Structure formats: C-alpha cells, structure tokens
Amino acid sequence: MFNLSSFVQKAQSAAQQLIDPMQGLNLTNSDRNPSKASLFQSQFRLPASQTPLYEIPAELTIPPSNITQGDKDRDRGWHYAGKLHLSDSYICFSTTATSFVQSASTSSSAAFTGQTHGGGPSGNGFTFPLCAIRRVERLNSQTFQFALAITTWNGITQELAKDKDVQRDKKDFREQRITIHLAASRPACERFCDGLKRGLRGAVGNVGRYKKVIADCYSEYLLRPEEMKNVNPPDAGLGMVFRYPGDPKKLRDRAKMRLWAEYLRDNGRNATLIRQPTFHKLIRVGLPNRLRGEMWELTSGSLYLRLENPTLYVDTLAKFEGRESLAIDEIEKDLNRSLPEYPGFQAEDGISRLRRVLTAYSWVNPEVGYCQAMNIVVAALLIYMSETQAFFLLSALCDRLVPGYYSSTMYGTLLDQKVFESLVEKTMPILWEHLVKSDVQLSVVSLPWFLSLYINSMPLVFAFRVLDVFFVEGPKVLFQVGLAILRINGEDLLDASDDGAFISVLKSYFSRLDESAHPKSENPKLRAINRFQELMVVAFKEFSAITHSSIQDLRMKNKDAVLNNIENFAKRTAIRNLGPESKLLSADELSSLYDRFYTVLYERQQRDSIIQEEQIRRAKASRARGAETFTEHRDHGIEKGRVGLGPSTSLMDYDAFREFLASVSKWAISDTQPSPRRDPSSEKDRNGYFGSFRRAESNPLSPWGGGPEPADHEFMQRLFRRWDVDSSSTLTLQNVVTGLAHIKGKRDIMGTITYFFELYDDDGDGRVDREGILRISEALLFISRRGLEGSLSPSNSSVTLDGMTEGDKGSASPPIGGTVNERFLGSVSAFIRRCFEYADPDHPSNQHVMSIERSSSPGVADTDIPAADNSAFAIGDDEEEEEEDLLAFEDATDNLKTTKKKPDLGSVPPAIGKPDAEEGRKRAVSKAQSEKANVALDPSNPLHITLPTFRMVVLADELLEQFFESSFPASLHIIDGLPNASSQYTSALTTFSNMGFGRSAAGSLPVSQPGIAGAGRGLRGVLDNLVTDASRVAAEVRRRMEEAQRELEKNALPGQRDDDEEEEEDIQGPIKTSGGYGGDAERRSVLSTDRDLLDGADADAGAGKANEGSRQSMLLDPNVPQGRTSTSSSATQRIVEFES
Amino acid sequence: MADANAPKPSSSVKLVLLGEAAVGKSSLVLRFVNNDFQENKEPTIGAAFLTQKCNLPTRTIKFEIWDTAGQERFASLAPMYYRNAQAALVVYDLTKPTSLIKAKHWVAELQRQASPGIVIALVGNKLDLTGEGGAGQDGSEGAEGEEAGDARKITTEEAQSYAEEEGLLFFETSAKTGHNVTEVFTAIANAIPETSLKSTRGAGASSMANRGGDEQRVNLNGPREAAKEGCAC
C-alpha cells in the first residue's frame, strides 16, 4: 500500500471504488472458493490493496498492564494462540480459525475451511499497519523458540515524540510492547521475518501520515494526560455540538467511557488496538457516544481506507466543486428528510455536512451515486464522526458490509431479502406458513430494516447499538436482529392477516423497545431488562447459528434468481421505454436486440477484466519473490457488467459495435486475412474519431473472445456514426434500436435507399461526391461478399425462373446464391458506371452560393463538358491503367496510402467529412486550372450525385433494387443471429477476384443473361477487367487524383508547402501542368473506345430488362440539363471567389 | 372512527402510488390521510404504508396505501408493492413533461404486470402552480388555461386523451391546496367493483374482527393515523 507505485495507482484511481465492489458478496464463478486475498481482506477489514503474503502459526503474549491489572496472578500476561498474517503493509493476528486449508500451499489455498469466511475481526488479535510499528526485536533468549517483540507507536503522538522530556517524565506512560512466538519451522520463520523486514522498511515513510490520521481519533484526546487536554478534542460528530441522542445517564455513558479508557490504555488505541474478549463485551453493551465513531471506523476497517488516502475526501470535494449531477439533485431533495428529528439536521451545519459527504461519495463511486436510505445512514454516522470518517465508512459500507444494497439495481438489497426470507422459512416455519397463507410479503416490512440498517425503524439509541455490533461482526447481525424481531413478535404476527396489520405489530414493537421485557416479573433484575436487551440476547444467542458463511451460502443459492428477476424487470422496462421507433421492430426483435446489446457489453467487460487480471498476474510473476509468495489470485469471474448488478456501462463503443454487428450479420465478420478492400482513409479516421477505441494489439488473449473477429470496414464506421446521434462516440440501446429500426423496421425500399445515401452524404447537403460514390460501391461489395440474403429474383426478366420466391428466412446461401452473387458484382460495377454517367458536376468549394447561382446566372464556361464524358473517362482511365499497372498494383495502393496520408497530416483535423472537403478543395483548384487551360476533361473534375440520381441508378438495376428492398435489411439477423462458426465465413467470399471473373467468367455465367451471351466473351472480359475489383477501381481513381494533384503541386511551387498555402499559390501562380496535360491527352485518346465499352456494358447490364432501361432514360432526361446549368454557373462563380 | 356508527360493510382496498420522484405522491397521501400539507418528514424507504377510510353511500372502503419511493432505482422494488393492488394512483407533475412519460411507463407496467382489473387513476399534481387550483377544494373547475404565468407544461387535453385511450380515471389535483384530492380517492373507491372487494382481501367478511385490529393500528401508528376526520366524501 505504501510503496510508491501503488501510491500513484491509488491517486489515479481516486475516483474508483476503494474496495473491490464484489468482494463483499463474493458473487463470483469461484464462489465456493473465494480468493484468499478477498477473505483475508474481509477478515481483517483491509483495503483491496492488501494481499496476504505470509501466514504463520504463532502465540501472542500481551504483557500484564502495570497500572490497573497489577496483581500477581496476571504477571504473566495473556496468551493467545492463533495465526499471524503479513500483507504488504499490515501485520495481523487472529485467534479465530484461519480461513484457509491448513495443508494447502499458501499460493494455491483458494479453498477454505475456516469459520470466519472473512467475517470480520471477531476473534482476539490485532490489525497493525506496519507504519504503526516502531520497532521489532528478535528475542534470542531461548534458542528453541523464535520470538519477536513488537513495539508500536501507540500513545506516542507527534508532540510527545518531539518532546522527549515530557515522555520520560511521564511515569505512567508505557510503550505498547507485545511478544509473538512463531510456531513454525525455522526457515518459515526466517522467511516471515524477511518479509516483515521488507514491509517495515517500506512503511517507514508513512509514519507521519499515520500519526496525522490517528490524530483525528477521539481516543488520542481521551488518553491524553489531563494537563495536556488544553487542545480542542477531535471532531467526534455532530453530537458534540447538538448532543448525542438518548439520555447519557440512562445510557451510562460515563461508566462506559471509563471502561473504554482503561481498556484502551491497556490494549492500545485506534490502529494499535489489540482485541481481547473484553473488547467484544464492551461493544455488545453499547459504545460510549464520543468513542462510537472511532470504534465504528476501526471495526469496519474504514480507518485503513482513510490511512491509505487521507485526503481523498477533501480532494474529491475540491475536484468536483461546482459540478452538477443527477445524484446531487437527488441528494438535495432528501437533505431535509434525513433524521429530521435530530437537532443537528435542523441546522445548516448538519445539513451541509450531510450534503458534502453524500456528494463526495457520489463522485467517488458514480456507479452507486446516491440511493435513498444512504442519506439516513450517513446522517446517523455524522452524529458520531467527522465528515471524512463518515465518507470512508460509507465506502466500507457500500463496498463491503452491505454490498449492492445501494447500487443502481439494488440487487444486494433484493438478494438479502430473499436470504432473509429463506432464513425465516427455515427457523420459523409456522410463521412462514402463516405469511404465505395470508399473502403477506415479508420484504415489504423487512426491506427498510436492512436498507437503512434499522436506523429508520428503531429508536435511534437502539439502532446505534445494533450498528455497534454490526460493524464488528458484519452483515449477519442484520439478519440475526431481523429474525429475533420476528421471533419475539411471533404470536402477534400470527394474528396479523395482511400487510397492514403486520406492519402495525412491528411498528408498535419498535416504539416500546425501551419498556421492560418482563414488566410483571417478581425478579427486579429481570424486570430491569428492557425489550431491546431481550432482542439482543435472542438475536445473538438463539440465532448464533446464523454465521457469515451461512449467509454467504444462501446468497449464492439465491443470487441467480434475484439477478434474473432484476434483469427481466430491467429488460421489460427498457424495451417498453424505447422511443416510438422501436414500434417498427417486433417484440421478439427488440427482445433479442436487448439481449445482444448487453451480452456484447457484458462479455467484453468480462474479457477485459480477465485480460487485466492476466496482465496483473504477469506483472506480479515477473517481480521476483520468495517461494512462498502468494500469487494474487483474484476471481476471474467478477460479474461486473451484468445488468442485474447494475451494469457498469450501458454504452457501446465502436469496437463493441463491431462485435455486435458480427453477431447478427455475416458481412460484419472479418475475413481472416486483412481485407484488401480496407479503405485507406480509415487509417486517419482511426486516429481521430475512432482513435480512442483502439486497444493495444499486443493483447495475448483474443479481444473478441470465442466469437468471430468482426470486420472493420468504412461502412461500419459510417453506420456507427450515423447511429451515434448525439456524437458521444458511444451508442445506447436506444441508438441501436433506432438505427436498426430505420434499416429493418420500415421494409420500404425508398427508405432504405435514402438511408444508404444519407450515410454517405457527409455534410448533409444532399450530394454524394465521387469519393462517396466509390465508397458506396465498396460498401455494396463489402456487404455482399459472403452472398446476398433476402428475396432475390434469379433473373432480370420477370418470370423466367421459379425457384426463388422467398429466401427471406435469412439462409446463408440462397438456392442460386452463387450466380446471383456473381451477377451482383456486375450490378455494382454498373452502379459505379451509371453513377458517374449521371452525376452532376460539382464545385464543393463554393457550395454555399450554389443555390443562388443555380437559379440566377446562366451557364458560361463549360457546357461542353458532358457529365457522361467525365465518368466515361474516369472509368476508361482506370481500365487503361489496369492494363499498365496490373502487376505493380500492390505498390500502387501502397503508394496511395502513403501519399494520401501526407497532405492530411498537416491541415486536416480528422473530423467526419473533412477529408472529403479537403479533397474537394483540391479538386476545385485543379478544376480552376484546367479551366484556365481550357481543358475540359480533368480527372479530378468534381462531381456528385443527388438522392434522386442515386435512387434512379439503384432502381435501374433489379438486383440492386432487391438488395435495398430485402437483402440488406435481411442481412441483419437480430433474432436468430448467426451460427457461431467463423470459419464458415472466412472462405467463399464473393469478390471479383475470387470468382475468377476475368478469364473464365463467361463460361460460368448464367445462361439467363442474354446480354452476356450476345456480347460474347471479349466484351465481358473487357468489362470484367474494367471492374476487376471495386477497390481497385476506387483506388485507381484516387491514385489518379492524387497523382494529378501532386503534379499540380510539384509544378506550381517547388519545395514543401502547406496545403492551405498551396491552394492560393496554385491559383495565382503560373500554371504549367505538363503532367496533367499529358494525362489528359492520354485519357482523351481512349475516350472513344471507352464509350464503346460503356455502350456494350449498358447493353450487357440492361439487356435483360429493356423495359427498365427505357424507363430509366426517361427518368434521366430532366436531370441532366439541370445539372449542367448549375455546374457551369457555379464554376464561374467559384473562380471569382478564388481570385477575390 | 368515521365508520364506527355506520353498519355499512367495510372492506379494505390496497392502493399503490407510483410516479417519478418529487411529483408529490407523498403529499397527495398526506393530504388525503391527514388533510395536511407539509414537508414530508418521513423519508420513504421502499414504501410508506398508511391507511385511510373512505365512506361511500353503500359501504366503507379502507384504503391501505402504499406510497412508493420515487427514485429510479427503487423501480425494481415496485412489483413488490403493486402486487395484489386493486387500485393504483399514477402521479405526474403537470409542470414537468418527463414525469408524464414516466407515468405512462408505469401505466404500461401496471397494465401488463399488476393484477388484472386494477383500477388506475392518472393524476396530474401541482395544479396550484398553474394558477388554476388556487381556489382550493371549493373552487370551481373548468377555469383552465385562463391565468397568466402558467407553469403548466402538460395540457389537460393531452393527459385526458391519453387517459381515455388507456381507460384510466383522470384528475388534476393540488396536494397543496387540496383541490380534487379526495375526489380522486372517492372516484377510485367507486370504481372498484363490488365483487373484487369481497373476493380479494376478505376484509368484508371478518369486518368485526378487523375493526378491533384497526383501532389498535391507528393508535400505534402515531398522530397521523389518529386523525379522525376520515374521508371527506
């Protein structure tokens, strides 16, 4: 704890829980065998940073106290046999049976036989922080024994230590010195001592902190010599100002205080206290007011949390000062409702203390935040302790003592109610039967008992006495007291026949707790016993069989049922509360969607924690330690993230989204080899929007668990961004439902087409540019590469074939899938072609004036650039390039990647759509130049398609139409999911290259395509070459553009310049683009053949559906001239703008 | 007690209050039970339990009221309280649109999960903030939307039409002024079918025995329960 690294770690995790949140419940997969560390921590109430290093049988000898117990009989002091434990910064001794199998090796003794089950410091012994130890001596008086004498800092405060004279003068001051005989083999003893030595050395630096922390303990003041009590006593809660509840005389507070002072003087105070039987007795009779806070802090272990990070409370308040949260709003509502009868909470002082403690905790543990009932508990704590102490005690409560009680699902509360019910059933079968028969739900009554630790149910004085024991002995006390209440009121309860009557009986009982339990008894002693005392006796005598471990067993038994209940409720509610879009999906779909969503999140968290554990384990293993080193054996099955436990996240990041998609659609599963179609620009996307999701690739364990590795395609990124409506980089269930509802819910082809178009319309201006068109086609190929699903008609002609009526079942391969899929490739290439053919020229750089221009000025300049030419030459260009570069293709793409990165690095913030804008600007530049040079056909002539164009192009092709109509929506299998066999999908990709389209395609093509048969092998071959792979087409176009751009840049100015600068320079400077011209000339030369090609291609694609072809051209006509006018006008405008 | 001299049959009805936090559930109950309005001094952990009688011409209804905690995370406890309930008051704050959404969620939950035939009343509380309920219990209704400085965010029509759609009783109330509060409970009492009264809790049959218990219960539950006004209907 006190070494530097963990110190830093602590500081970093200040906003995390102080104790492992699951530790208290041990609700892990290895439930029956809770980890040794967690048992150790529970038994001695130590922070989660402490792991047991060594344990050794030992005998503790406490010397006789020279002042009060000076008689001869006790000269030899007290002896306790037990076990001595050493952790990183604590040395602990307990007489209660140790929690571990005796014979097991220390490193593997996860199994456990003891009685304590980490039940708390119930035995005799001590828990010393190593920094509280002043000196350890090895006693060599007897050679056959191995003995240590431990001297603590007990009683030596800072001033005392400084003022040595005072100390020496004090006759009655006595160092706390205890002797421990180690009862083990010599080597074992030596090892233990070595460990102790190391620990002590590490702890030296923390002595100062220790002294500061214990200075807040009231015992330090209490035990001061009278003449030094001039200083103010430490804060022992609101009670010091507003009086403590109850009548001090009746509570015999003074007598108790005297007894405690004596005990503390003899046995050490606060951190150096030694637990002897008297200690437990003193606690059972009720703590004195001013020591109550300190004892709660000590027995609950929250003192050790405070010792670990003393300034956490103050720091947290400072850090979050002025911040607002839902929890704070909720806290504010309850401040005036927390123990309102107590004067301290009628005053601003008390209210603001309460506010600060609750607020600080809500920041430190945002998963819990604030839960009603915490206000009552904290209010009670604040009567007896300072804010800081209450803050840490609240941590200890929420994380260990009543785990899950206040969580967002309150699973701990519900679980313990089930446990309580089963205990009632077991111990009071008649009452239980009556409850069942009269349909009374016990938890209606008992839930508030547990949730507010009886503070809200009993009169405060009595509730605090329950708490006194509860903090030492743990949650079993709540059950014992609850059972005792029912037992004592059994008769009356058997008469009660409904909830109301039941509640009344108990209410009246609580209000008479101070009355005599035996008012009619002759015996005055018996008469003096009040009902509360009777309750305590019944609780701890009659129900002594209720132990920590029996509670734990019952918790395990009921855990699943309770969590399932909560999860069902949460699911029901969540689904019902989804927005109106959810109505588009069926109930089954929503249900599976919900399950899938949380399954992905849950499994990812599980994997993360396992990976983390693995890393911790490795780190630990690499640290050389003795043979007896405990390897930290944390439970791997920490079920964090399970909905019933209060999901630690309900947000899906991009990686989780990919995993989610991969579970419902086969196209989202990655090809085993990295996809060749991977978009080069995704590299930079990742650095920006998606950069934060990237985890280190060095993870030894698969980050995808047993599932298939999801693909990472630009299309998925776009989908994610589209669904992420509030740009939070995460998706909620609502986002996912809404997103899917738009795709799957409507079953409306126009809607789907629009949706797809909008995915690629980055700036929402209703246009998709060249880049976008290529990306759309890439996405189409990406989605279809494992075959299309949904209802696809086999032929372009309407009714030639019969078989394919309904493939809607989502079968992985439709009957004639192969051929359909092959044809789909053709459709996509036709799509690209048509897009370019019918695209409108565009000038993205001055889009803002576009609309005005469109209506006002008539075209001037480039009416001689037909849109068709642009596209024709874009594709023709590629085709030609293809032949040239076919072998060097890989290099080309590599070049592309590297060159593409360069211009972006300098100027482009990697936000959505920005790269395109950048390119647009570049294109605009080259456009300006080409126009100046009167070159009509520039490769980077910007163009775009609008939604109507896109729609038309899609509808022009029956397969594409079917894709949008059914195939794409059907490819998301929300309900049945995918058979979880990734290998199935890695092969059999339908891509151009896989099909071997280029060479022998004609033979394998279906006969039902008369166009191809007619056109013959040659034509088809050319076409196939043309689109050998859509990625190549895209890459080539881009490369061309890049090249042209680079040429321009090179020629415009020598040397490296920023893009921004270049833009302006380019326009004004002399433009000599020899490369560009050359390229253009070349391109022009192939233009005519390209045209032929396209004609052929058109015939090919459209042959089977002449009807549609004609419809399509009809549709087209009005669009084309309009596009042209707008282009020409805006072109002039743009030049003006650049020059001005 | 109000029914002490009446030979009318008495039966108890379990009623649960649900709704977003701070819409005034507890205040409504307090107004109904004690005819009082004040800061709720008793925090609602899980649920508060109160009883109040309501005299109808033909019978006496004893409401066993479960006033649930409004904090979101307590929602998963709600099934425990609405189990076997014969009536539910789903409360929203008519100055706070989100509270109506939450109320609709509760209505849906009850309709699907609670006992069939449960009588649900949708109650828009805090009418006083709209300047309409200021007239108090004797104030005339139908003066909606006239005042200026209206904090109302949910129109009567909107909530009313929703209530009609779902077959709910509908009221707008002010726990502060008491406007319409008893009317809600009376309407519920009237809406509960006679048959369900007899069958469900068996209170009618053993009314004498129960009455003794009631007496005791009232005393034990402190001053609040001891208010002898009864239901003002």
Image (spheres, coloured by chain):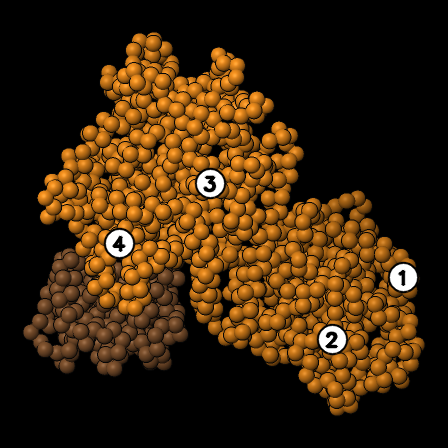
Chain colours: A orange, B brown
Residue A526 in sight here: yes
Query: Who comes first in sequence, dot 4 or dot 3?
Result: 3
- Near-viewer residue (A745 or A725): A745
Please, is residue A1003 above or below residue A413 in the view? Answer: below
Residue under label 3 = A114
SS class of the residue under badge 2? Answer: loop
Q: Nearer the viewer, mark 1 or mark 2?
A: 2
SS class of the residue under badge 1? Answer: loop
Residue A310 in sight here: no
Residue under label 4 = A487
The answer to whether tags 4 and 3 share a subunit is: yes
Residue under label 1 = A886
Q: Which amino acid lies under the numbered mark 1 shown in the image of this protein?
A: Leu
At label 3, counting other C-alpha atoms closer than 10 Å, the crowd grade (few under 14, some 14-19, many 20 or more) is some
Q: Left of A626 or right of it: where is A387?
A: left
Query: Who comes first in sequence, dot 3 or dot 1?
Result: 3
The answer to whether tags 3 and 1 share a subunit is: yes
Q: Which amino acid lies under the numbered mark 4 shown in the image of this protein?
A: Arg
How far is mark 4 from mark 3, CA to CA?
A: 29 Å
Q: Residue furthest left?
A: B5
How far is mark 3 from mark 1, CA to CA?
A: 74 Å
SS class of the residue under badge 4? Answer: helix
Q: Nearer the viewer, mark 3 or mark 1?
A: 3
Please, is residue A1016 above or below residue B48 in the view? Answer: below
Q: Position of residue B184 (x, y in %)?
A: 23, 73
How far is mark 2 from mark 4, CA to CA?
A: 67 Å
